Amino acid sequence: MEAISYERASDVAGAIRSAQQPGTAFIGGGTNLLDLMKGGVARPVRLVDITHIRGLDSVDALPNGGLRIGALVRNSDAANHATVRSRYPLLTQALLAGASAQLRNMATVGGNLMQRTRCNYFYDPAFARCNKREPGSGCAAIDGHTRMHAILGASPQCIAVNPSDMSVALAALDAVVRVNGPHGERTIAFGDFHRLPGDRPDLDTTLRPGELITSVDLPPPLYSDHAYYLKVRDRASYAFALVSVAAALQMDRGTIRSARIALGGVAHRPWRANEAEQMLAGHALNDANLQAAAAAALRDARPQRDNAFKIQLAQRSIVRALKEAAQQPGGVA
Ligand code: SF4
């Protein structure tokens, strides 16, 4: 048994100070970290409980018309917040597609951003090779079972995917992550928050040592009326995505004024389909245009041995999600 010390932080500054000691981990809802600790994958020597820090558990309007969601807001509270439901329905849909009701009641927004891949080889230390768990050890997945793994942005060091549904919606919505750390506050554009694996798959994010997420800021809502989160998975609930699509549109009758498309289940981070978005802007919403955009989104896909099916699945999911988004009445009832 390994000794772990526990400390309860009462404010952000205290939490950051405590995190200066090597081997410290912040704990919020703990829904992922405790699993990792029980499995011997994460081995912090010190836990700093951040759940009693005041001011990080509220949802507040921003002066620019956007919305600030505190890092300690529970996933279920974020999903069901009246403003999120009416102005950011894509986020509500994505949150409610994730995990189970019990987990959503515990898990925090900040923790959701930090959850780690569900690659089976990462979770089982019986597999010695995992560059994410033990840098330099190799990758057991690459010549293993790869049905759930990446088709975009992978590297020879790691082919894992990010498991978060919430993050796919936040990528499409151009959210900003606010963090505080030993060198002060800063903001990180959502597209820069999660990393591709490259030659450092042990690093999931661009957070610096000792930094604490304090909120996720949403820009003014431009996609309240036409948004849809489609998650394709092996069973109807409590399963990670094979492929997911966060689709949002601004429509002018039958013409797409602008489009936002992000994919989940395909890469080490939520995958924004920028080229597809540009192809759709200013064009009619019809099958030919949607299919051309979907093909562009997957042009660079490189499947693993067991998951070539994800390419067509993702293309079809993009088309369907965009059609559903166009038909949405706005908000979540
Ligand atoms: Fe580890 Fe990544 Fe390989 Fe999975 S895919 S075994 S997480 S290095």
Image (cartoon, rainbow, N blue to C red):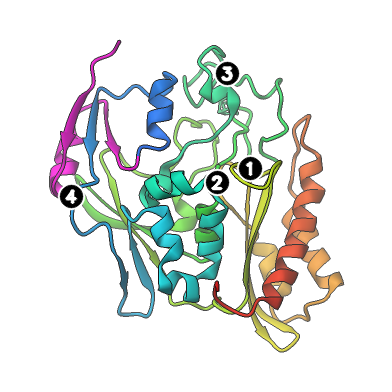
Confirm or deny contact between disc 1 and disc 2 (CB under 8 A).
yes
Query: Around disc 2, counting alpha carbons within 10 Å, would you say few (fewer than 14), some (14 to 19), or many (20 or more)?
Result: many
Q: Residue at x 71, y 29 (%)?
A: 146
Confirm or deny contact between disc 4 and disc 1 (CB under 8 A).
no
The first of marks 4 and 1 along the sequence is 4
C-alpha distance separating marks 1 and 3: 18 Å
Does ligand 1 reach within 8 Å of label 1's beta carbon? no
Q: Which residue lies furthest to the bottom in this view?
A: 253
**Magenta-drawn segment:** 1-29
The first of marks 4 and 3 along the sequence is 4
Q: Residue 153 carries which label?
A: 1
Taking the image as four quarters, which one is ligand 1 found in? top right
Residue 245 location, quadrant: bottom right
For label 4, the residue is 12
C-alpha distance separating marks 4 and 3: 37 Å
Callout 4: SS: helix
Q: Residue at x 66, y 35 (%)?
A: 149
Callout 1: SS: loop
Q: Residue 269 carries which label?
A: 2
From the viewer's perspective, is the residue at label 1 or at label 2 nearer?
Answer: 2
Callout 3: SS: loop
| Residue 21 on the magenta span | yes
Q: Residue 76 carries which label?
A: none
Confirm or deny contact between disc 2 and disc 3 (CB under 8 A).
no
Q: Which residue is drawn at 44% across and 50% down?
A: 193
